[in-house]
Amino acid sequence: MTRYAFREISKRDIVELAKIRASTSGSQDQWSDRIKQYLEGAVNPQSALRERVIYVAKQDEIIAGFVAGHLSTRFDCDGELQWIDIKPESAPGENE
């Protein structure tokens, strides 16, 4: 069975997260800037509050995917998921 470890990101993880996002759309440079600005609060989704977080899932010390979200007042909710991404080669197989 594959084991994953989870933790909040550090700024040095942004490059790897940008590679994951760019694998389906945009460029790595575009996503590096966007993720950094999202964390810093310079880019704000509609009705987003300042509090936001990104967690990575690591498999054998390699980032396998990530999830990002923020507090929000939109749709009378407390929070929203901004991104959820996984490297295709990191997806668990049917037998795991």
Image: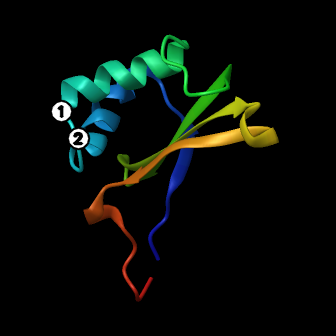
Residue type beneath disc 1: Ser
Residue linked to disc 2: 22
Q: Residues within 10 Å of mark 1 (few under 14, many from 20)?
A: few
Query: Residue at horizontal 53%, vertical 51%?
Result: 5
Residue drawn at 40 percent across, 25 percent down: 35
Against 70, is 95 above or below? below
x then y, percent, for residue 12: 36, 22
Comparing 2 with 24, the one in front is 24
Question: Is disc 1 in contact with disc 2, using a CB cutoff of under 8 Å?
Answer: yes
Residue at 36% across / 80% down in the picture? 93
**Rendered view: 85 above or below 94:** above
The answer to which image quadrant residue 55 occupies is top right
32 vs 73, nearest the viewer: 73
Q: Secondary structure at mark 2?
A: helix
Which secondary structure, mark 1?
loop
Where residue 17 appears, as percent x and y from the top left, is: 34, 37
Around disc 2, counting alpha carbons within 10 Å, would you say few (fewer than 14), some (14 to 19), or many (20 or more)?
some
Give residue 8's quadrant in the image. top right
Q: Position of residue 18 (x, y in %)?
A: 29, 34
- Indicate left or right for 33 with 7 as reference: left
Report the residue marked by disc 1. 27
The quadrant in which residue 89 appears is bottom left
Which corner quadrant holds the C terminus? bottom left
Q: Is residue 65 left or right of residue 72?
A: left
Task: Using the image as rendered, state which of residue 43 and residue 8 is in the foreground.
Answer: 43
x and y percentages locating residue 14 in the rendered image:
36, 27
* Disc on res. 16: none
Determine the CA span between mark 1 and mark 2: 5 Å
Residue name at image x 48 percent, y 21 percent: 38
Q: From the viewer's perspective, tell me whether residue 30 is left or right of residue 40.
A: left
Q: Is residue 10 above or below residue 93?
A: above
Q: Amino acid at mark 2?
A: Ala
